[in-house]
Each structure stands twice: as C-alpha cells, then as structure tokens.
Amino acid sequence: PLMPSGVAPSPTPLLPDQPDFKALAAVDAAFGAALKKTKARAKALSLPLGGVVDDEFNLCLTRAILKAHFGYGHFSIPPGYLVPPVPNRQRYVEWLRTLLVSGGSDGGGGGGLSVEDGTGGREGGLLGLDVGTGASCIYPLLGARMGWRFLATDVDEESVQNARRIVRENNLSEAVVVLRVA
C-alpha cells in the first residue's frame, strides 16, 4: 500500500495474502498435521485445497501465523466461533496506524501521532477500543504488538472468557483489558 511521506514503516512486517504453508508447517506441528490431512482430503475429492478447508484447518493456520509472525504461543477458539483471517486483520490495523500517524488519509499531517513510533509518544501509548472483540480478540492482539493498549468489549460471555484467556496466556494483561458489556 502507498504510505504517506514521513510515516515510519510498520513495526511488524505485513503478512502476504497467501501464507507460506510449508514454512508454517515447519514451525508448527499441529498446522503441519492439519495441512497434510486437508491435502489428502482435497486429493481424494479431486478438489483444490481451498475447496476442502474446514474450521479445524483455519484455526490451526491462524494459530501458526500468530505463533510464527507475532510470537503468540496461545490461541484457541471455541467451536462455532469466528476464526479470523490474520493477514486481513493485520492490514486493517496497519491502515489505522498509518492514518493516525499521518494525521489523515492525505498524509498532510496536522493532528497525527508521533511519526517515530506510531504510539502517540504518550506514556503507555495509544488506547484502542474494540467493540465486539469476539472470542479471538484479534485486533487487540495485533495492536499490542505495535505498542498499543486496548479495551476490548463483547456481549457474549463465552467470547469474553476466551478472549481473557488468550490475553492472559500471552502475557498481555498490561496491554489489553477485556470487558463484558450488556
């Protein structure tokens, strides 16, 4: 994407649209097993890999990406809940960072945050609000890697409990607070 002049590069390199399955399988055994199983199913049904991908594969892929690219070793989603596509979510967070740092979509400055780090140069950095964080808490996870803090909210108790577990198990309790709202 085009970056306004004067905007520092992202602290986390952008993920490619198509993940490197082979590299991810090499660093995450569970993903390697899910990939092997999915490839076998695709071959048996004479379908492309994308035609047989299921929730288990998506969860293993998301977990492997978060582990390999962001250093998060703990990620789980209850059955039936959304498993977010990480590259897409990362691009959104990066777009927000670029907007905030540049001071607007035209890159003309005026009201932007600290160009040096994208956190606003304030004690504790930028505070984001994620309304409807879901069971994955994905936006706060990605934003925390950029030095941001988050208040994540949801109405669903199981989503809130799962998001809290993800935050706690990845040692992000100082950066992310998850609240249930009515």
Image (cartoon, helix red, strand yellow):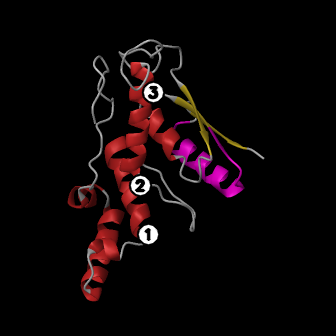
- Residue 19 lies left or right of residue 142; in this view the side is left
Q: CA distance from mark 3 to mark 1?
A: 30 Å
Residue underneath mark 3: 147
Q: What residue range appears in magenta?
A: 152-172
Residue 75 vs residue 127, the one in the foreground:
127
- Residue 61 place in picture, x, y as percent: 36, 60
Residue underneath mark 1: 56
Circle 2 — which element? loop
Residue at x-position 32% and y-position 30%: 10
* Magenta span includes 25: no
Residue depth check, mark 1 versus mark 2: number of the one nearer the observer: 2
What is the crowding at mark 3: few (fewer than 14 residues within 10 Å), some, or many (at least 20)?
A: some
Q: CA distance from mark 3 to mark 2?
A: 21 Å
Residue 170 appears in the rendering = no
| First reached walking from the N terminus: tag 3 or tag 2 | 2
- Mark 1 and mark 2 in contact? Answer it, CB < 8 Å: no
Residue underneath mark 2: 85
Amino acid type assigned to the residue bearing label 3 in the image: Gly
Residue at x-position 41% and y-position 54%: 85
Amino acid type assigned to the residue bearing label 1 in the image: Glu
- Residue 43 place in picture, x, y as percent: 24, 83
Q: Is residue 20 above or below residue 89?
A: below
